[in-house]
Image: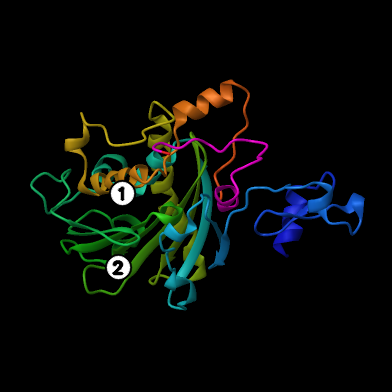
Amino acid sequence: MEVSVIMEKLFPPFHGWQFNRDGQCTKIPSIGDDDPQTAAPGVKVDAYPTIEKQGLIWAFLGDDPESAKPIMDIPELDDSQYAVIPYDVIFESNFHLAKFSNLDYVHLPIVHGIRFEDQENPYQPPPHTVEKTDYGMTAFIETESTYSKGAWSNVREEGTKVKSILKYFIAGQTLRGQVEIGAIGSGKFNCFYEFSTPIDRTRTMMRYYFFRNFMTHKWMNKMALKRNLKNIFEDKVIAEAQVPKYGPDGMSEIVGKHEDTVIKVYWDLMHEMKDKGWQIDYSAWNKLIEDGKYCVIPSVTRKNNPENWQYPAIPRINT
Ligand SMILES: [Fe+2]
């Protein structure tokens, strides 16, 4: 189905006005073939660049798409060695907290019972490396863990280490987690992709692809999904229990020094974006809402032509 048809079904038109990809009004059916810009000069809407990639639609919701970070590739989608299970669920939590449910190492033993058995303190993640990249960051960790206990215990011998690689992409709040679950060198990988889309300040759409290249029979999918969902729903409970619901927007100076390295780098990346003026000024926005003002996400169309907009842009910090 074409995107325009989907959009018409989702948002049935009132007067049928049409707009081009730059947001300019191109047709007003009630005036026939007359030029809309003559009949209603300057009528426009905010427009955002979008692309379709690997079955997902990516929109750049901002006015500086040249600064967009790279979008993650999903090579497993085209690899017949892998079985895939898609899943999505809404977390009633802020998108940062939703992201931490898979990004953070320290919660693994507490929330999921995945302890680091080769550590004197199995609740302490072993030394690991975190590298900043052009897309976000990559984290590597090698450990003997309780990860493959249960139904998948057959793929790994007790006492062997697993290697985990986490890749975090700023674009789309995307996470790729890969665990070589059958011990290092086994070639047996469990892989997940997580896309987090903020719906508002306290709700986040979480979409997942769960991949595995072992036990790939279709009849194993139910067990594999159940296993993955156990973790997701354990995370959901924790993320949704956090207060205040709308935060945080940055690393706390008080508790920050105790944070996991991955979380510290995550906040570094967020603070870099804030310094560029890419963070919402909630205080100013709330005031506009109180004043009855409806606000719109800033767009290129608006930046290039800042005059005569019906609604103001959502205010940002440092802009
Ligand atoms: Fe988790």
Above or below residue 317? Residue 101 is below
Residue extending furthest bottom? 80
Residue, disc 2: 155
Of residue 90 and residue 57, the one placed in the foreground of this image is 57
- Point out the stretch of residues depicted in magenta: 300-318
Question: Main structural element of the magenta stretch: helix, strand or loop?
Answer: loop
Assess whether residue 317 is covered by the magenta stretch: yes
Classify 10 Å Cα crowding around label 1: few (below 14), some (14-19), many (20 and above): some
Q: What amino acid is found at the position of numbered circle 1 in the picture? A: Leu
Marks 2 and 1, how far apart in space?
36 Å
State the SS at label 1: helix
Of residue 177 and residue 247, the one placed in the foreground of this image is 247
Residue extending furthest left? 120
Q: Quadrant of the C terminus?
A: top left
Q: What amino acid is found at the position of numbered circle 2 in the picture? A: Val
State the SS at label 2: helix
Residue, disc 1: 269
Give the residue drawn at x 68%, y 37%. Answer: 310
Q: Is residue 168 left or right of residue 3?
A: left
Location of residue 9 in the rendering, given as x and y in whole percent from the top left corner: 77, 52
